[in-house]
Structure formats: structure tokens, C-alpha cells
Image: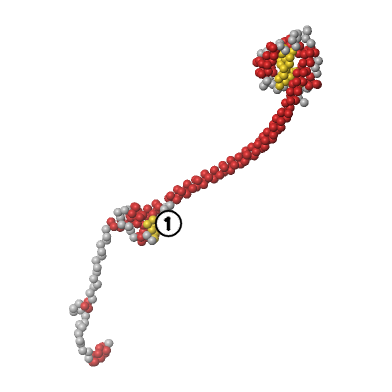
Amino acid sequence: MAIVDVRILVEGASDVEVVSKALQGLALGSEYNITISAIIPTTNVEIAKSAAAGADLLIIATDADRVGRDLAERLFSELGEMVGHVERMKLPLGHDLEHVDVELVRKELKNTLVRAGLKTLQLLPGYVELRKQLLDVKGQYDLLAQEYENLEKEHGELQEKYEELHAEYVRVRNENEGLRELLEKKSRPLKIDDAWKSLFPAEPVPDEGVIALAVKKLGLAGKVIVGQGYIFAEEKELVEELLKTVYLSLSIKEELPRPPEPPVEEPPKSRESEPGSGPEVVENAEVKPEDIEGLLKGL
């Protein structure tokens, strides 16, 4: 059991001697489990505050007259919140050490301690209730502390998960931005007329076959598709470059001079057809049998 710290506040040095004399006949440690740690001779409030602060029980021992009562009330109001409990003790008038009845002072001191104890007992039910409330609050505090620890652990896990998700979000966002940039570079199928007019509004649109031939000659098959009046490539720039190449080729072809046509040679005339060359053909000549026989003999 803890020792109760009791301090006694008196008016002067003579009172210290009287109280000390009275304490000699008391076994306070064994009877009341208390110790008188200090007897403080002062009427100065600030000194009293400094000396009494932290005591379990403060006894203000002043004279029984009006001056002593006023001093006790003033000290009581000033020191009440600095100690566990404050109790008033009245010293008999004319209590110099030679004439004072020490037994009377001793009896008054014991009565003061008993009153303090009884008042403490009166406060005991409230103390027990407060202790119960304190235990309840402590139990709630322990639960809250455990809950806080769990929440803090969960917070750490969620923070780690958030950082992972944030890193994934940044990665996906960068990937989407890259895809968006790639899609912006992609072209859709365009009408040949529209694509050509956007580049060469004053020039006639070439035949679709010409553009298809240019795709084949330039090795763009599979990269550029031409048909049904449309042209398509994954990159719009490739369509523009192809049409510019076709335009350039057509322009050069128109500006090149045409080669002269070679002279037409007449077939040479046969000599037989010239007069005086070859046998003469006699129209309606009569052939006789003997002439035929003569010809056969000549062969």
C-alpha cells in the first residue's frame, strides 16, 4: 500500500515547534499509513503553493481566532487544486511551547486526520464509479488502439496497392497517348477525287488505272490500296506522296516532245510488172493441142 504524503502548513516558527512536539506521540505510519513530509511555516501564498504542490493531504493549521480563520480560508481556496485533499486544523489560542497543552494539539491533529479519512471515504463511491468509468474508457481506448493499429496496417497495404495502381495507370496512360498519336497518323479510305483535289485543285483527276499502275511500279502494293474510286494507306503521308509522284509523272510526260514518225516505205515493184520485162501475156490466146505436145517434148 502506498504511503500517504501529508504536509502541514502553519503560520510561524513557533507553530512548527508545537506541531512537532505533538507528532512525537503519534505512530502515523503504522496507524494511518501516512508520513508527515513537511511542516511549512508561512503565510505567503506563493511560498505555500511551491511547498505544498503534489501533496496527498495538506493540513492548514492556524489559530482558532478570526485572523487564523481568514488565513485558512484564503489558503484553502488558493491551494485546493494543487493537492489531493485540504483539511483545516485549529490550534488553541496562546499555544506557546511552554504553556500549550501538547496532548490537546495531538488530539486535534488525530481528529483532523480522521476527518480527512472520513471525507475520503465519502468520496470513495464516486471514486469507485470514476475508476469504473476509467476502466471502461481504458477498455475502449485499447479497442480503439487495436483498431487504429489494424487501420494503420491496412492503410499501409492500401498505400502500397495505390502506388502499384498509380504506376500501372501511368504506364497505361503513356501507352494510350502513344496509341492516340499513332491513330492520328493513320488515314481513312479517301475518294480519289477528294484526295487529288486537295493537292491539285486545278488539275484534272487522273484515271484510277494510272494510280493503280503507279502503286505497282513503285512497289507499294499492300501498302496502298486503290479501287472503286477510293485510295487507302495506313499513313496519310504515303497517299500524298503517291499522288504527287503521279502528278509529277503526268506533268513530265506532257512536256516531253513527241518523237517524229518514221517515213512509210512503199514495197518495191516487181520487174515482171514493168513493160518489156518477162514474157508477154496474150489475152484470150488460143492454145492448140500440138502446141501443148511440143511444150511437153521440150521439157
Residue in the foreground of this view, choosing between 76 and 268: 76
Give coordinates of residue 116: x percent, y percent. Answer: 74, 21
Give the quarter of the image for residue 135: top right
* 225 with respect to 144 (left or right): left
Quarter of the image with the C terminus is: bottom left
Is residue 151 visible in the rendered structure shown here? yes
Residue plotted at (54% across, 45% down):
168
Relative to 176, say whether 58 is above or below.
above
Secondary structure at numbered mark 1: loop
10 Å neighbourhood of mark 1: few (<14), some, or many (≥20)?
few
Residue at the spot of label 1: 223
Q: Nearer the viewer, residue 186 or 87?
A: 87
User: In the image, residue 246 lies at what x, y percent?
Assistant: 34, 56
Locate the N terminus by quadrant: top right
**Amino acid marked by disc 1:** Lys
Image point (43%, 54%), residue name: 234
In the depicted structure, whether residue 171 falls above or below residue 229: above
For the residue pair 158 and 33, the one nearer the viewer reads as: 33
Q: Which residue is outermost to the top? A: 98
Q: Residue furthest bottom?
A: 290
Can residue 42 be seen by looking at this rendering? no
Q: Position of residue 260 (x, y in %)?
A: 25, 62
Query: Which image quarter: residue 149?
Result: top right
Residue farthest along the left direction in this orientation: 275
The residue sitting at the front extreme is 66
Number of numbered callouts drawn: 1
Q: Is residue 118 left or right of residue 156?
A: right
- Left-right relation of 157 to 4: left
Q: How is the image coloured?
A: secondary structure
Would you place residue 176 above or below residue 2 in this image?
below
Residue located at (77% from left, 16% from top): 108
Residue at 69% from the left image edge and 12% from the top image edge: 66
